[in-house]
Image (spheres, helix red, strand yellow):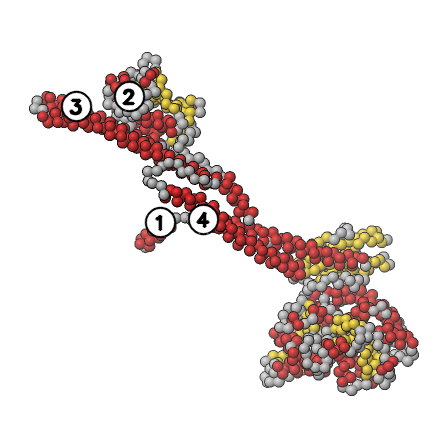
C-alpha cells in the first residue's frame, strides 16, 4: 500500500510538472464557449421553431373554429349548428381533430362534451389558444365565441376545435434539423478560425522567443520588438524584469567590489598584526597584539555581517510584499538585544498605530529597524527611544538617541554605502557605514523616506516613514483586462351515440390448412363473406397454420360494437365506411402499424399509419337488363333524376338504395353526393316520389334487381355488382359519366386487439402483390395498388366511366358528416323527402 501511494504521488507530481499549453487552454476554452453558444442557439431555434409552427397551424385551427362559428344559428330559441363541409377540409395532415360547441349556458350542443374541461368559456370573437392533455395525447385548442341573443338574454356561444400536435412538432423538428447543419458547420469553421487565430496571436511570442534565444547571456538591454498591445505588456514586464536583473547584477558587482575593498584592509591589518604577534617575545606586548587582532576580527565579522545583510535586503526587496504588523516587529527587535542593551531602549506605540500594518517584506522591515536601533546604541551612551505613530497617510518609525549627531552638511552623505559621519568615525565604535544605506534602500523601495533630525539637547532622531498602503516600486503593473474581456466577448458571440351492438348477421370459420392450428385470427367486417373469403383463403395458403374466424355485420354495427366495448375486441376490422373507420382512429381506438408497402398506398386511402385502404370500389348505378334497356339506362346522376321524374309510375317501388340511417357506407356515399352534386336533393325528391326501397346492404339490393323485384339500384358498391355480373346475373352496370365516387375498403387493428401480430400479417398480405392479385381477380373488390395482375384493377375500373373519379379521402374532413347535429339534420331532411309516407 505505501508503494502504491508513493507511485500515485509521483504520478501527481509528474502531472503537476507537465507544461501546460496556453494554446490548448484557449482552444478548449474558446471551443467550450462556441459549443455553449451553439447550444444556446439550438435552444433558441427550437423555441422559435415551436412558436413558428404554432403560429402556422393556429391559423388553420382558428379558421376551422370561425367556420363552425359562422354556421351557428338559433332555432326556436335553441342554439343549433350544422358543420360546414369546409370545417375540417383545411386539415390535411395526420393529426386527430376534436371539436365542441357550447351554448351560452355551458351546455354541449354538439361535438365532444369533455373537450372544454379546464377551459374558460369564450368572451369574444378573437381566437384564444391553449394546450392541454386530452384522450392520452397533447392537443392545441382554439376557442372562439359567437354572440347570440335569445329571449333569455345575450351570451356567447363557445366553439372549440382541437388538434393533436403531431404535425406541429414534426414541422418544428424539420425547422430545427434544417438549422442544425449550418450551426454545426459554422461551429466547426469557427473552431478552425479560432485555431488559426491563436497561431497568429502567438506569432509575436514566437518572435520574442527567437530574439531571446539569439541574445548573449550578458545582454540585459531592453527588448525592442514591434508587438501588439496584448504582448506589449509582456514585453514591458520582461524589460522590467531584465532591468531589475541588471540592477541586481550591478549591485552584486558593486557589493563584491566594495566588499573586496572594505574587507581587504581589515584582513591585511589582521595578517600584519598576527605576524607581529608571532615575532613578539614579551608576554605583555603579545597580549596587546592579540587584543588588537581580536578587535580587528570583530570589526571584520561585523562588516561581513552587514555586507550579507545588505545583500539579503537587496534580494528580498524583489519579493511580493504582504501585510505585516509593525508593532510586534519592533518589539521583536528589542527582545533580540542583549540584556545590557535592551535596558537602554524604550518603545512607545501610539494607540492609533497599535494595529497598523505595512505591505512590506517582514525581514526587510525588521532589518531596517534593527539597523536604526543598532546605530543609535553604537554611537550613544544614554537611552534610545523607539516610537511608532501615524503621520497622515504614512506610518512613522522614529529612533532617537543622545549621541554626537550628524552635521547638516553630512546628512545627505551618510546614506551612501560605507559612509559615516566625522563624529562617528572619531568615536570608531566598529561601524561599517552600511546601516543607513540599508534603511534608505528599504524606504526608497516602498516609496517612503528617511529623515534625519537633530534633537534639542543633543542627539539624533531618525524617522523612517512608509506609506500605510504602499506597494513596492519594483512591482510590475497590473495586467490590462480590457483585452481579455474583448476576447471573451468575441468568443461568446460565436434550439355517434352509444348503442348496444346488433347481433352479427353472419359468421364463418376458416380452419387452418395444417393441423393443429397455431392460432386463430378474428376478423370483424362489413364485407360480403363470399367475396372476402377469396382473400382469407389466399392468406391461409401463405400461412397454413392460421385459422380465421370472420364475423360479418353492417358497417354501422361494426363501428358501434368497437365503440361500446361490450364484447371482446377482434384482431382486425374491415369496413367500407371510411368515415366511421376514420372516427375510430380519431377516438384513439386503433393501434398504429407501418406496413412494408405503406408508401405505395395512395395518400387518399390511408391516415396516420392506422387505417389502410386496400380496395378500389366505385359507387355505381345497377339496372335489370330485362326491365331497363341499356340505351335508356341513365348515364349521369341528373339523368337518373329526370328518368324517375318522367316515369314515376313505371319505377314506383322498383328503385332501391341504401337506408342511410342504418348503413354506414350508405350514409357516407349520400353525404359525399350532397357535397359534390347540386342535383342531390332533386334526386332524393325523385326517390321519394318513386317510393324508393331502402336497405342496409348492397347484396340485398342486387339480389332483388337480379330477380326483377327492383328495376334499378343507386350507389351500389361496384365490386359486388361486378361479381354478380360475372356470375351471369341479368344486370347492367353504369359507372356514371359525370362523376364517380370511389371508396376504399379499409383495414385497422383495434387498440386492444388480442393478437395484433396476426392482424399485421393479414394487412401485409392484403397489400402484397399476391393479395392485390386476389382483389383484382376472383374477389373482384378492385386492386388499389398499382401493378396488380387481374381484371379489376384501379385503372380499368376508372376507365369504365367517362366522369371524373372522385376518391373519398381518409382524414378529418370525413368527421364533418358524422357530427351529431349535422347527421340528425341530414337524416331528418332525407326522411322528409325520401320517405314522407
Q: Which residue is mark 1?
A: 13
Taking the image as drawn, is residue 694 in sight?
Answer: no
For numbered disc 4, what is the local secondary structure?
helix
Please report the residue visible at 76 percent of the width from the left and 80 percent of the height from the top.
720
Question: 696 or 370: nearer the eye?
Answer: 370
Nearest to the eye among marks 2 and 1: give it.
2
Q: Which residue is mark 3?
A: 292
What percent of the width, then of the height, locates residue 744? 72, 73
Q: Tell me which numbered mark, 1 or 3, is placed earlier along the sequence.
A: 1
Please report the residue visible at 76 percent of the width from the left and 85 percent of the height from the top.
726
Please report the residue visible at 29 percent of the width from the left and 22 percent of the height from the top.
419
Q: Which residue is mark 4?
A: 23
Q: Looking at this view, name the residue that lies furthest to the top.
A: 457
Q: Looking at this view, name the residue that lies furthest to the bottom.
A: 728
The reply to whether the C-beta atoms of the residues labelled 2 and 1 are less than 8 Å apart is no
For numbered disc 3, what is the local secondary structure?
helix
Marks 2 and 1, how far apart at CA: 53 Å
Please report the residue visible at 81 percent of the width from the left and 83 percent of the height from the top.
731
Say the numbered circle drawn on residue 420: 2
- Quadrant for the N terminus, please: bottom left
Question: 506 or 674: nearer the eye?
Answer: 674
Marks 4 and 1, how far apart at CA: 22 Å
The local crowd at label 4, few if under 14, some if 14 to 19, many if 20 or more residues have their Cα within 10 Å, is: some
- Quadrant for the C terminus, please: bottom right
Q: Tell me which numbered mark, 2 or 1, is placed earlier along the sequence.
A: 1
- Residue 498 to residue 377: above or below: below
Amino acid at each position: 500500500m505505501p508503494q502504491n501511494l508513493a507511485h500515485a504521488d509521483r504520478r501527481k507530481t509528474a502531472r503537476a510538472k507537465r507544461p501546460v499549453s496556453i494554446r490548448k487552454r484557449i482552444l478548449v476554452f474558446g471551443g467550450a464557449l462556441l459549443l455553449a453558444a451553439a447550444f444556446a442557439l439550438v435552444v433558441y431555434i427550437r423555441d422559435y421553431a415551436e412558436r413558428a409552427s404554432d403560429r402556422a397551424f393556429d391559423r388553420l385551427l382558428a379558421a376551422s373554429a370561425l367556420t363552425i362559428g359562422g354556421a351557428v344559428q338559433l332555432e326556436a330559441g335553441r342554439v343549433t349548428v350544422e358543420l360546414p363541409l369546409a370545417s375540417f377540409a383545411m386539415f390535411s395532415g395526420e393529426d386527430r381533430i376534436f371539436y365542441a360547441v357550447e351554448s351560452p349556458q355551458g351546455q354541449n350542443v354538439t361535438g365532444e362534451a369533455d373537450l372544454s374541461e379546464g377551459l374558460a368559456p369564450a368572451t369574444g370573437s378573437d381566437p384564444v389558444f391553449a394546450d392541454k392533455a386530452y384522450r392520452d395525447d397533447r392537443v392545441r385548442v382554439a376557442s372562439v365565441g359567437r354572440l347570440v341573443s335569445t329571449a333569455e338574454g345575450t351570451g356567447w356561444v363557445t366553439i372549440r376545435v382541437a388538434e393533436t400536435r403531431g404535425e406541429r412538432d414534426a414541422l418544428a423538428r424539420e425547422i430545427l434539423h434544417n438549422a442544425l447543419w449550418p450551426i454545426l458547420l459554422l461551429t466547426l469553421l469557427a473552431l478552425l478560425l479560432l485555431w488559426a487565430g491563436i497561431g497568429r496571436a502567438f506569432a509575436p511570442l514566437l518572435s520574442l522567443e527567437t530574439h531571446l534565444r539569439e541574445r548573449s547571456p550578458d545582454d540585459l538591454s531592453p527588448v525592442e520588438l514591434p508587438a501588439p498591445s496584448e504582448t506589449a505588456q509582456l514585453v514591458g514586464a520582461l524589460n522590467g524584469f531584465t532591468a531589475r536583473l541588471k540592477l541586481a547584477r550591478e549591485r552584486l558587482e558593486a557589493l563584491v567590489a566594495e566588499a573586496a575593498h572594505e574587507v581587504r584592509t581589515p584582513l591585511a591589518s589582521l595578517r600584519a598584526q598576527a605576524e607581529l604577534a608571532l615575532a613578539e617575545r614579551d608576554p605583555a606586548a603579545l597580549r596587546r597584539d592579540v587584543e588588537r587582532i581580536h578587535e580587528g576580527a570583530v570589526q571584520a565579522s561585523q562588516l561581513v555581517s552587514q555586507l550579507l545583510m545588505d545583500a539579503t535586503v537587496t534580494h528580498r526587496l524583489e519579493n511580493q510584499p504582504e501585510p505585516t504588523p509593525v508593532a510586534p516587529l519592533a518589539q521583536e527587535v528589542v527582545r533580540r538585544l542583549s540584556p545590557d542593551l535592551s535596558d537602554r531602549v524604550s518603545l512607545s506605540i501610539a494607540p492609533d498605530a497599535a494595529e497598523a500594518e505595512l505591505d512590506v517584506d517582514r525581514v526587510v522591515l525588521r532589518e531596517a529597524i534593527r539597523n536604526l536601533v543598532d546605530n543609535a546604541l553604537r554611537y550613544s551612551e544614554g537611552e534610545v527611544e523607539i516610537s511608532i505613530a501615524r503621520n497622515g497617510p504614512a506610518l512613522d518609525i522614529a529612533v532617537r538617541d543622545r549621541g554626537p549627531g550628524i552635521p547638516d552638511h553630512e546628512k545627505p552623505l551618510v546614506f551612501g554605502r560605507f559612509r559615516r559621519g566625522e563624529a562617528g568615525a572619531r568615536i570608531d565604535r566598529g561601524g561599517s557605514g552600511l546601516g543607513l544605506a540599508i534603511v534608505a534602500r528599504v524606504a526608497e523601495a516602498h516609496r517612503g523616506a528617511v529623515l534625519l533630525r537633530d534633537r534639542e539637547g543633543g542627539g539624533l532622531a531618525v524617522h523612517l516613514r512608509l506609506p500605510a498602503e504602499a506597494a513596492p516600486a519594483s512591482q510590475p503593473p497590473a495586467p490590462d483586462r480590457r483585452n481579455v474581456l474583448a476576447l471573451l466577448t468575441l468568443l461568446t458571440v460565436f434550439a355517434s351515440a352509444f348503442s348496444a351492438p346488433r347481433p352479427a348477421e353472419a359468421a364463418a370459420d376458416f380452419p387452418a390448412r395444417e393441423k393443429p392450428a397455431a392460432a386463430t385470427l378474428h376478423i370483424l367486417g362489413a364485407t360480403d363473406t363470399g367475396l372476402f373469403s377469396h382473400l382469407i383463403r389466399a392468406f391461409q395458403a401463405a400461412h397454413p397454420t392460421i385459422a380465421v374466424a370472420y364475423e360479418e355485420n353492417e358497417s354501422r354495427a361494426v363501428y358501434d360494437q368497437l365503440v361500446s366495448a361490450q364484447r371482446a375486441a377482434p384482431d382486425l376490422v374491415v369496413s367500407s365506411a371510411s368515415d366511421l373507420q376514420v372516427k375510430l382512429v380519431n377516438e384513439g381506438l386503433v393501434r398504429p402499424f407501418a406496413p412494408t408497402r405503406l408508401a405505395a398506398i395512395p395518400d387518399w386511402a390511408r391516415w396516420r399509419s392506422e387505417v389502410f385502404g386496400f380496395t378500389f370500389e366505385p359507387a355505381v348505378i345497377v339496372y335489370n337488363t330485362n326491365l331497363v334497356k341499356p340505351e335508356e339506362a341513365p348515364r349521369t346522376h341528373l339523368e337518373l333524376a329526370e328518368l324517375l321524374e318522367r316515369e314515376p309510375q313505371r319505377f314506383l317501388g322498383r328503385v332501391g338504395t341504401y337506408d342511410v340511417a342504418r348503413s354506414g357506407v350508405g350514409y357516407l356515399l349520400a353525404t359525399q353526393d350532397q357535397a359534390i352534386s347540386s342535383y342531390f336533393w332533386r334526386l332524393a325528391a325523385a326517390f321519394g316520389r318513386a317510393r324508393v326501397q331502402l336497405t342496409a346492404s348492397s347484396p340485398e339490393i342486387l339480389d332483388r334487381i337480379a330477380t326483377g323485384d327492383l328495376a334499378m339500384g343507386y350507389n351500389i358498391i361496384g365490386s359486388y355488382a361486378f361479381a354478380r355480373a360475372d356470375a351471369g346475373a341479368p344486370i347492367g352496370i353504369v359507372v356514371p359519366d359525370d362523376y364517380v365516387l370511389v371508396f376504399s375498403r379499409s383495414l385497422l387493428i383495434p387498440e386492444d386487439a388480442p393478437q395484433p401480430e396476426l392482424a399485421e400479417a393479414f394487412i401485409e398480405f392484403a397489400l402484397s402483390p399476391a393479395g392485390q392479385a386476389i382483389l383484382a381477380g376472383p374477389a373482384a373488390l378492385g386492386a388499389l395498388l398499382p401493378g396488380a395482375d387481374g381484371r379489376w384493377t384501379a385503372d380499368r375500373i376508372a376507365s369504365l366511366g367517362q366522369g371524373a373519379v372522385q376518391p373519398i379521402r381518409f382524414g378529418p374532413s370525413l368527421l364533418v358528416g358524422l357530427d351529431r347535429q349535422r347527421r340528425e339534420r341530414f337524416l331528418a331532411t332525407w326522411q322528409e323527402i325520401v320517405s314522407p309516407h
